[in-house]
Amino acid sequence: MKYIPEKTAKIEPYGFEDSSGITVKLDANESFVSLPDRLREKLAKIALNADYNRYPDPLSGAAVRAFSKYLGVPPENLVAGNGSDELIFLIENSLMARGERLLCCAPDFSMYRFYSGLAELEFTDMPKTGDFEINAEALASEVRKTGAKAVMFSNPCSPTGLGLSRETVLKLVSDTDRLWIIDEAYMDFWDQSVADEAVKRKNLIVLRTCSKAFGLAALRLGFAVSCAEITEALIKAKSPANVNALTCAMAAEVISDGEYIEKAVAAIKESSAELGKKLGELGRDCGFETVKSVANFTFAVPEKQGDALKIQEFLKSRGILVRRLGQKLRITAGSRAENAALFEALEAYAKERKEGVS
């Protein structure tokens, strides 16, 4: 008897970069901002006093209440997940049935397709324009053409850093009777969220995460924002105690610290602006073009086939890790020192390239 079904056997695992020997990690869109001592002390106290013998709150009440205040939506319209990834898996498996079609846009976050295979959905990837934009009219047409039940895309987009305006997203949601899942993992760095509308509309879910702006990637916490009916369905379908007690309590403490969040977001946006500007300049000599980003990373498109790997390997040799996505690169904004190390390495690459070494 075959015990591993085809849908699992054919999975291509998520490709983590090898970080051995790396001193500057710019591949995962994490925050470079460390928690201040006052928060670290509070989190240490939470860990010291936790009831490790008890299951966590099944509704993650403390974290949900804190995030509802931050986002300005009612707590009863939020579902907490073990990272946004769990929520993507939950949505695809509980709100869609085997054989129904999920429509996404390419390039985008690879886990949308990954989980669709496990849910046994039909999957369509609509290519973006040559400038990596989502053409809203073309997307609406593709929805009707394919008969997709649901549409999912990140906004701002990972990996490109481009975004669709709030007005455009809401027009798509209004004009097309499908389920729209908008992944706003990087919306803390932009101002076009539709999360407030998700609580009112029957066909809109917004995903948010604590892994980027809040600097809590290690805790693995995300939220789904939706109307009462969808929220109830997701709560029924999720695991009984899916978010651990330490994550819930610690995240609630951090999310409630407005001073830290404001400073962290400002620092990341400043670094991102510096990164985008400098990479735009260095790209001319390094052989790549960049895409103007509204997120905390820059998308680089090398001119020649194979150059993405060359650049990545060159940077690795200098202890710097960036994300390679086929023939393209995604580079996360780092601290001032990390950005400086990256720029110095790329200047060295450009010099070798000019001399015909690289």
Image (spheres, rainbow, N blue to C red):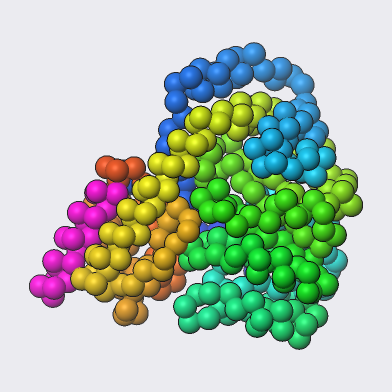
Magenta highlight range: 339-358
In front here: 332 or 15? 332
Q: Position of residue 97 (x, y in %)?
A: 85, 66
* Residue at the image position 64 percent from the left and 13 percent from the top: 49
Task: Please tell me which residue lies in front, 80 or 357.
Answer: 80
Q: Quadrant of residue 47?
A: top right
* Rendering coords of residue 205 (x, y %): 75, 56
**Quadrant (top left, top right, bottom left, bottom right) of the N terminus:** bottom right
Of 277 and 90, the residue lying toward us: 277
Q: In the image, is 87 to the left or to the right of 342?
A: right
- Classify residue 73 by image quadrant: top right
Residue at far bottom of view: 145
The residue sitting at 76% across, 31% down in the picture is 61
**Considering only vertical position in the picture, is 217 above or below 256?**
below
Vertical order, 216 against 272 (above or below): above
Give me the residue at 30% from left, 66% from top.
280
Residue 268, by quadrant, is top left
Q: How many marks?
A: 0
Q: Is residue 349 magenta?
A: yes
Q: Is residue 274 above or below residue 336?
A: below
The main secondary structure of the magenta stretch is: helix
